[in-house]
Image (cartoon, rainbow, N blue to C red):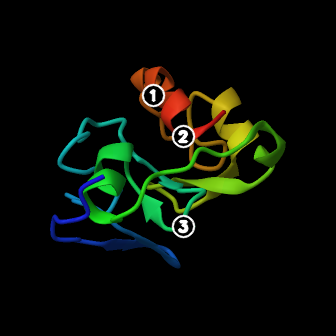
Amino acid sequence: MRGRSADRPTRVGEITVHGLVVDGETRCEHYRGALDVIAIAFACCGDWYPCHLCHEEIAGHEARRWGRDERTTQAVLCGVCGSLLSIHAYLDAQGCPECSAGFNPGCRLHHHLYFD
């Protein structure tokens, strides 16, 4: 937990996404590939970040993972169209069910950082 870098938020629809954001589709300095187009509301604070590293650098507190009993919570934002997905829907998806934007399949390697 660092909490010292400069927040450079962006807006996607009505949601402000915090972090070291590079573009309006939620790509950040850490993950900026073509398919890196989601943001996650962190369970600890409810704030939206593109990735765990942005949260670590900006938030100033430890992250908390979403519990299995919270999987119906709309905590994932498609950075392309602004749709909200439940955690369950996101974990079952390869892309956005609304706009068909693909999600980075490599993100599955990091699910344990966000979700129990």
In the rendered image, the quadrant that contains the C terminus is top right
Residue type at tag 3: Cys
Q: Residue at x 50, y 74 (%)?
A: 13
Q: Is residue 46 left or right of residue 55?
A: right
Residue 17 in sight = yes
Q: Position of residue 17 (x, y in %)?
A: 40, 67
- The vertical placement of 54 against 65, above or below, is below
Q: Residue at x 66, y 46 (%)?
A: 66
Which one is nearer the viewer's eye here, 114 or 97?
114
Q: Are marks 2 and 1 in contact (CB under 8 Å)?
A: yes
Residue type at tag 1: His
Q: Residue at x 45, y 20 (%)?
A: 109
Q: Position of residue 65 (x, y in %)?
A: 59, 44
| Element carrying mark 3 | loop
Which one is nearer the viewer's eye here, 34 or 4?
4
Q: Quadrant of residue 68?
A: top right
- The vertical placement of 100 against 80, above or below, is above
Q: Position of residue 43 (x, y in %)?
A: 60, 56
Residue type at tag 2: Tyr
Residue 23 in sight = no
Q: Disc 3 designates what residue?
A: 45
Q: Quadrant of residue 20?
A: bottom left
The earlier-in-sequence mark between 2 and 3 is 3
Q: Is residue 68 left or right of residue 39?
A: right
Q: Disc 1 designates what residue?
A: 110
Distance in Å between CA atoms under marks 2 and 3? 13 Å
Which one is nearer the viewer's eye here, 72 or 32?
72
| Element carrying mark 1 | helix
Label 1 Cα crowd, 10 Å radius (few <14 / some 14-19 / many 20+): few
Q: Is residue 39 left or right of residue 68?
A: left
Q: Residue at x 26, y 63 (%)?
A: 3
Q: Which mark is residue 114?
A: 2
